[in-house]
Each structure stands twice: as structure tokens, then as C-alpha cells.
Image: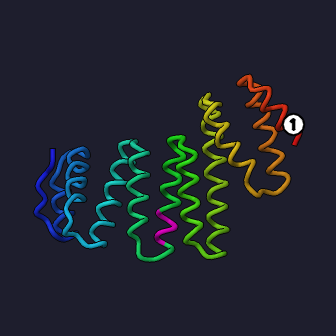
Amino acid sequence: MAIQVRERTIEEIEGKLAGMSTALNKIGYLESALNISGFNFEIKRFLWNELSRLYEERKMFERAARAMANKAGMEVTFRDKIDSYVTAAELFARVGKVDDADDMFVRASRDANTEQKSKVRLARKNIFSVSAKELESKGKKASAVKFYEKLIKMNLDSAEKAEIKVKLLTTYKALGMFREAKLLAGL
């Protein structure tokens, strides 16, 4: 059901959102507002940001990540664009969507200078390792393997790589993936 959107400024939209009682009503309103073509980029960025925040509050991380990725496409400065892509990648990682998270990191790296690229690589390593540990602690070893496989392919120092290799070997063996464990042990 589409909600009629009459508001034309950020202040009017904020006022309308403040008057709504539930997050789902706010989400419906924001989605309807995004379908209107008369808004400028500043208002669209605000709408995508609010929508992402509401989705994240409702634990709808994949939709929040998609909204943040759309916001990143409308950002003016490279720093804001990179921050939005990294946030989207973090949200995708929370869901377990490794390839989508990796795609967001690639997009962030594409827009970054050399200093920012190192920060993006560090964020990628940290987010992937935290996600893998979280999934493993929840007993979702098959999902954690995907993150460990991405981590082992990254340019890390030898100590970190050895630590990840050991974790990946034990996880492979726990899952009965002996062929993969044998191939990894040969590296």
C-alpha cells in the first residue's frame, strides 16, 4: 500500500515521521517517499539513511545494507561514500552475505585514495574476522568457513594468516570437509 507523500523538505518529513507511532509505518512512508521523483539528492540521502536506520533497528540487516548501498551511490564526497559502503558491508556481514559484503568493500576501495584503501582493508579484515568468530560461537561453522576463506585470500601478515589457517583447518575437519582440509594443509 503506497502512502501519499505531500512533504517536500527534510524538516517536514522529520515532522511527519515524528508523528508516526510504529517503525513499520515509518518504513512504509519512507519507501513511498523514495518512489517520488521530485526530491533532490540531499533529501534522497536523508530518506535512505533513515530507512537503513529503521531496518537495522528492526534487525532487517539485509534491507538496511541495501538501503545504505543506495545511499552511498548518492553521496557527494568520497569519504561519505566510502563510509556508507563500509557500513553496508558490515550489515551484509551480519547477515552472512559474504559476497555482497565483499562487493561493498570493492566499491569502497574503488573510490578511495591510498590512505583510505588501507583503512578499508583493515575494516574488511576486522569485520570478516569478527563475523567468523560470532558465527562460530553460535555453532554456525559452515557460514564461518566462508568468512575464513575470504580472510585467508587476503594479504595478511604471516602470523595472522597462520592463525586463520589453523581455525579454517579445524572448522573443515569439524564439518567433514577433509578434501578441503588436505588441500589447505598442503599450502
Q: Work out whether 28 lies above or below 83.
A: above
Q: Which residues are magenta?
A: 80-84
The answer to which quarter of the image holds residue 46 is bottom left
Q: Is residue 112 magenta?
A: no
Question: Which residue occupies the foreground of this view, 58 or 67?
Answer: 67
Whole-percent x, y for residue 72 in the image: 43, 65
The answer to which quarter of the image holds residue 157 is bottom right
Colour mapping: rainbow
Q: How many marks?
A: 1
- At horizontal 15% and vertical 59% (from top left) the residue drawn is 16
Q: Secondary structure at mark 1?
A: helix
Q: Work out whether 164 lies above or below 12.
A: above
Whole-percent x, y for residue 47 in the image: 29, 61
- At horizontal 78% and vertical 56% (from top left) the residue drawn is 156
* Left or right of residue 75, residue 184 in this image: right
Q: Which residue is mark 1?
A: 185
Q: Work out whether 99 lies above or below 141.
A: below
Whole-percent x, y for residue 112 in the image: 58, 72
In the rendered view of the protein, which quadrant contains the C terminus? Answer: top right
- At horizontal 49% and vertical 58% (from top left) the residue drawn is 87
- Magenta-highlighted stretch: main secondary structure? helix
In the rendered view of the protein, which quadrant contains the N terminus? Answer: top left
- Amino acid on which the number 1 mark rests in the picture: Ala
* Left or right of residue 30, residue 186 in this image: right
* Left or right of residue 66, residue 158 in this image: right
- At horizontal 13% and vertical 51% (from top left) the residue drawn is 3
Whole-percent x, y for residue 39 in the image: 22, 69
Question: Which residue occupies the foreground of this view, 55 or 33?
Answer: 33
> Dot 1 surroundings within 10 Å: few (below 14), some, or many (20 or more)?
few
Residue, far right: 186
